[in-house]
């Protein structure tokens, strides 16, 4: 965002404030499609940012949902069922039965355990529907199925009329900056898919792969995304697997569209150290890979000052914990109350991974920039009611205090 846009927004809305620029978001999706092999589909992990779903669904192939809450959000936003990937390690029977019983044309269900498989199979039989299935292959953690479990499912059920086995899902982590690691993973998947075909007679129609493409959050990072995506695209093209590849992405799609605005409310000097207190904090802003606030993220400071000497400042939030430090030893010119920090690349996870209920402070307003014009999609949200006990609940003996 330009300085003029930032000033206009903060004149209209109070800080702290999240701003998601939809033109940047759509340009990012277009750039990824141009950089990746033709025909590769993109799936957005909704957990990264639920506020951009309505705009993103127009330019994305699928959306991955991992909870009943995310499904409810997508339903209220009229996301087409065929664009939904129903995923997650805890698929409650009530939630899945509700989806299956509606006989919606859900894009695909993932299977993360034998219990999940049998739940889906039983419900498909009960409601007389054919469910599209992706079997998630574990990468050695709590997610997905072991190889032998997938082999067993395919051997026993691949011809079951209630199940439409689409292929395999695989994800092993985020912020991967090593093409060697991605090479190992894709080679492993190639071998696994080939074994399914040669030994079990199952030819997968799709591989949904989470590559964990990295985002350069910090100034010191030396990351050439153009060359990285070029190398990754070569890996995809070189695979023996030639059916549909879908890449599940979260931060790589959404990070660049976000800006977090927060003001300096107080300045002080303690024990020869400069401290600036901001009206935001770590309950609003989380950068993956930040280590004790020692890394400097991409940011703007308004107003821009040319006078005065550079000094190191510790930027602290509004929480009553010594851990609430956004940046340590940031070299800037004199800070004053009212100065505005615009932290960049905050469009993914920053607003959802923080300790948002700590100290019962309000959650920031959320604004979308659409064609350069602001659209308020969430007012600042007070959290004190969430943290306050309700002794007069109707569930307590007719509302009496117990």
Image (spheres, helix red, strand yellow):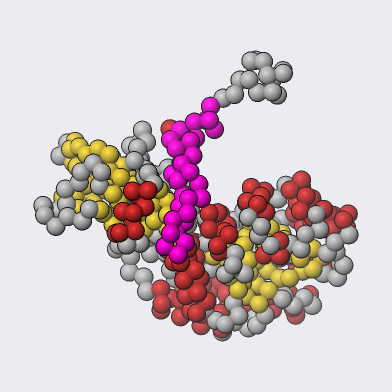
Position in image of residue 263 (x %, y %): 30, 45
Identity of the residue drawn at 60% across and 73% down: 41
Along the viewing direction, whichever of 125 and 201 lies nearer the viewer:
125
Position of the C terminus by quadrant: top right
Side of 12 where 117 appears, left or right: right
Q: Quadrant of residue 120?
A: bottom right
The stretch drawn in magenta includes residue 144 = no
Position of the N terminus by quadrant: bottom left
Side of 25 where 95 appears, left or right: right
Position in image of residue 139 (x %, y %): 59, 62
Side of 384 where 45 appears, left or right: right
Query: Is residue 289 at all visible to an observer of this figure?
Result: no
Read off the magenta span: 360-388
Identity of the residue drawn at 47% across and 61% down: 370
Position in image of residue 328 (x %, y %): 27, 48
Query: Is residue 312 at all visible to an observer of this figure?
Result: yes
60 versus 398 height, above or below: below
Q: How many marks?
A: 0
Along the viewing direction, whichever of 307 and 97 lies nearer the viewer:
307
Q: Give the residue at the far left of this rendering.
A: 308
Position in image of residue 231 (x %, y %): 46, 80
The stretch drawn in magenta includes residue 363 = yes
389 versus 230 height, above or below: above
Along the viewing direction, whichever of 247 and 332 lies nearer the viewer:
332
154 versus 33 height, above or below: above
Along the viewing direction, whichever of 371 and 134 lies nearer the viewer:
371
Identity of the residue drawn at 23% across and 41% down: 337
Identity of the residue drawn at 47% across and 75% down: 31
């Amino acid at each position: 965002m330009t300085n003029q846009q930032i000033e206009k927004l903060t004149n209209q809305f109070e800080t702290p404030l999240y701003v998601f620029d939809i033109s940047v978001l759509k340009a990012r999706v277009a750039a990824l499609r141009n950089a990746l092999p033709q025909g590769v589909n993109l799936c957005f992990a909704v957990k990264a940012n639920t506020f951009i779903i309505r705009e993103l669904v127009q330019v994305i192939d699928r959306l991955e949902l991992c909870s009943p809450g995310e499904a409810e959000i997508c339903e209220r936003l009229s996301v087409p069922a065929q664009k939904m990937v129903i995923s997650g390690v805890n698929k409650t029977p009530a939630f899945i039965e509700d989806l299956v019983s509606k006989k919606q044309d859900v894009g695909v269900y993932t299977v993360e355990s034998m219990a999940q498989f049998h739940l889906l199979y039983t419900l498909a039989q009960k409601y007389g529907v054919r469910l599209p299935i992706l079997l998630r292959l574990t990468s050695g953690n709590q997610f997905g199925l072991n190889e032998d479990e997938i082999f067993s499912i395919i051997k026993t059920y691949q011809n079951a009329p209630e199940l439409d086995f689409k292929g395999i899902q695989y994800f092993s982590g985020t912020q991967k900056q090593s093409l060697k690691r991605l090479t190992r993973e894709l080679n492993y998947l190639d071998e696994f898919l080939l074994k399914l075909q040669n030994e079990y007679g199952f030819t997968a129609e799709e591989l949904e792969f989470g590559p964990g493409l990295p985002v350069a959050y910090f100034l010191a990072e030396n990351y050439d995304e153009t060359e990285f995506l070029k190398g990754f695209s070569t890996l995809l093209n070189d695979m023996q697997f030639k059916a549909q590849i879908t890449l599940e992405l979260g931060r790589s799609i959404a990070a660049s569209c976000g800006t977090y605005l927060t003001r300096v409310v107080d300045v002080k000097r303690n024990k020869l150290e400069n401290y600036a207190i901001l009206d935001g904090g770590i309950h609003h802003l989380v950068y993956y890979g930040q280590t004790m606030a020692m890394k400097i993220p991409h940011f703007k400071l308004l107003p821009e000052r040319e006078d005065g000497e550079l000094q190191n400042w510790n930027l602290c939030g509004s929480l009553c914990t010594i851990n609430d430090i956004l940046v340590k030893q940031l070299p800037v010119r004199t800070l004053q109350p009212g100065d505005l920090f615009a932290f960049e690349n905050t469009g993914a996870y920053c607003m959802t991974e923080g300790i948002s209920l700590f100290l019962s402070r309000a959650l920031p307003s959320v604004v979308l920039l659409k064609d350069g014009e602001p659209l308020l999609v969430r007012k600042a949200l007070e959290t004190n009611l969430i943290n306050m006990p309700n002794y007069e609940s109707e569930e307590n003996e007719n509302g009496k205090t117990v």
